Amino acid sequence: MSSPPPGALTAAFIIAGKDLRSELRRRTALVSAVVFAALILVIFNFARDPTSLRAEQLAPSAFWITCAFAAVMALSRAFAVELEHGALDGLLLAPVPREALFLGKFLGNLVFVLVVEGITLPLFVLFFNVSLRGALPGIMLVAVLATVGFVAVGTVFSALTARVRFNELMLPVLLLPFMLPPLAGAAQVTAALLNGRPILESAGWLRLLLVYDITFVTLSLLIFPALFDE
Amino acid sequence: MTSPLSPSASSSFPPSLTSSDPRAAARRALRTGRVLTSIGLLGVFAAYVRAIAFTAVEGTQGPAQKIMYVHVPSAWCAFLAFGIVGICSGLYLWLGDRRLDTFSEASAEVGVVLTALVLMTGPIWGKPIWGTWWQWEPRLTSTLFLFFLFVGYLTLRRAMFDPAERARYSAVVGILGAMLVPFIHLSVYMFRTIHPRPVVLNPEGPTMPGSFVATLLFSLAAFTLLYLGLVTTRYGLGRLRELREARHVSAA
Amino acid sequence: MFLLREPPDNGSYMLAAYTIVAVVLVAYSLTLMVRARNEEQREQ
């Protein structure tokens, strides 16, 4: 009489879609994240000595640090809404495999963070007077590679810290070490691209990011169910 | 009737005739740990004597080079400690034996102490040899991140009170953390090859004289023994504590 | 004449490092033993 439970992949997309649609309606998280990112970019500009450090030298680091903080902020909210409304238990009771829950959350978070990065990029070009010069496709590629990596681990930690004390602090403390390889790669490649270097020169970093992504998306997917007592 | 020695006996809490066995096992661990720790401390003392009095001073680097004999073994043990945290975390999620979680916690506590030692001796060694207190080079940076991972692991444990949930969550962090360490190392290595810093002297030199290697290995053995003693002791302590708390819960 | 240079006089660094390691290891070992003994005695 009731329809059969959706397949795992469909369930994932449903979960991701639900999160993104509710975010699109209220937009508070998106607006806060973007404003937060803009503020950091502005402060970066004023926290340097203009005579000793040119804007272009600071630019890649400033952009990626901004994205990192905005992403952590976004991830700390990922499970908070369900928790507040007690919907998490409902989700868990549904006949959805835990992996699908992870996938759905991961995809939702990924899209969200990528959108924040996408909005931050033009701000960054504006504030730091950067000329993209055909570097855009490369920057988008490295942005996706880097973001996938830390959003995967971030989704696991976000679920983990949701019910832990001091969770606003615990999530960054746990997650930031995992952001080093993606951020280092992203910043280095962005800097190289903005300096006009061909993307093939950064193949080493891109390979590292790819391996990191494969490793941690797989690991996160496999380990996520362990968070829920069965 | 479950066998007293099976894992389920130690993780089932109602007091019974079998409850003295896990306690006895924990006390045995404590005793073994105390013995190993004492031997380990003596070993480290012997390593000190050997390094200071019976190993030559390196010609270009001076006595400060001897810091290697405490810095490198500490680092080796620190990474070993986290490797064990990772392995025990994985085994715990697979097998469910609470003792694996207790051992993991013990290794993390000893590991964070050792890591702190590496981070303290590193700059003290670096200043006379490199000229700077710190370098963003792969091993030192990996150790710094190891420290962050240990602290994150231990802080998470302190913020959680349900033992089963704490064990599961810590195991997740432990496994992910252990997988991260090689990536940190690679990232810093790649960063360095693009932005090489002049390393004035390689403290270990292209080839170390045999006597140096011997002293280093001796110190390595001593530190590893001490690490094993400390972890076993801490494990015994952890087991006694959790068995006692479990009895209070079931008595309530 | 071949002049052999003296090794640099940085023994104080070595002493500092060795002292820190010794103090920390002994202190931690002792506190661990004490904590263990307290826990054992709590059983009685």
Image (cartoon, coloured by chain):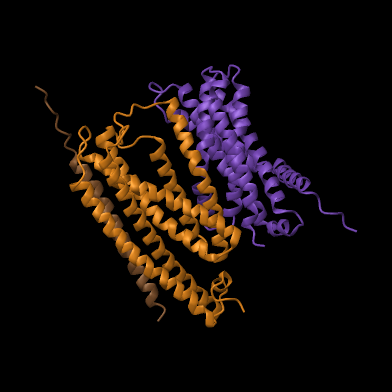
Chain colours: A purple, B orange, C brown
Can the viewer see residue A79? no
> Is the residue B92 above or below the residue B237 in the image?
above
- Percent position of residue B210, x then y: 28, 40
- Percent position of residue A25, x then y: 72, 42
Furthest residue in direction front, as rendered: B210
> Is the residue A193 above or below the residue C12 in the image?
above
Q: Is residue A195 left or right of residue A219?
A: left
Residue positioned 32% across, 32% down in the render: B206
Residue positioned 41% across, 72% down in the render: B28
> Is the residue A147 above or below the residue B153 in the image?
above
Count every numbered label the image shows and give the total.
Answer: 0
Residue positioned 23% across, 34% down in the render: B61
Q: Is residue B81 left or right of residue B67?
A: right
From the image, which quarter does the N terminus of chain A lie in? Answer: bottom right
User: Which is more toward the observer, A49 or B8?
Assistant: B8
- Percent position of residue A49, x then y: 39, 26
From the image, which quarter does the C terminus of chain A lie in? Answer: bottom right
Can the viewer see residue B209? yes
- Percent position of residue A126, x then y: 56, 23
Q: Quadrant of residue B44?
A: bottom left
Furthest residue in direction right, as rendered: A1
> Is the residue A98 above or below the residue A140 in the image?
below
Residue positioned 34% across, 63% down in the render: B36
Q: Is residue B47 left or right of residue A178?
A: left
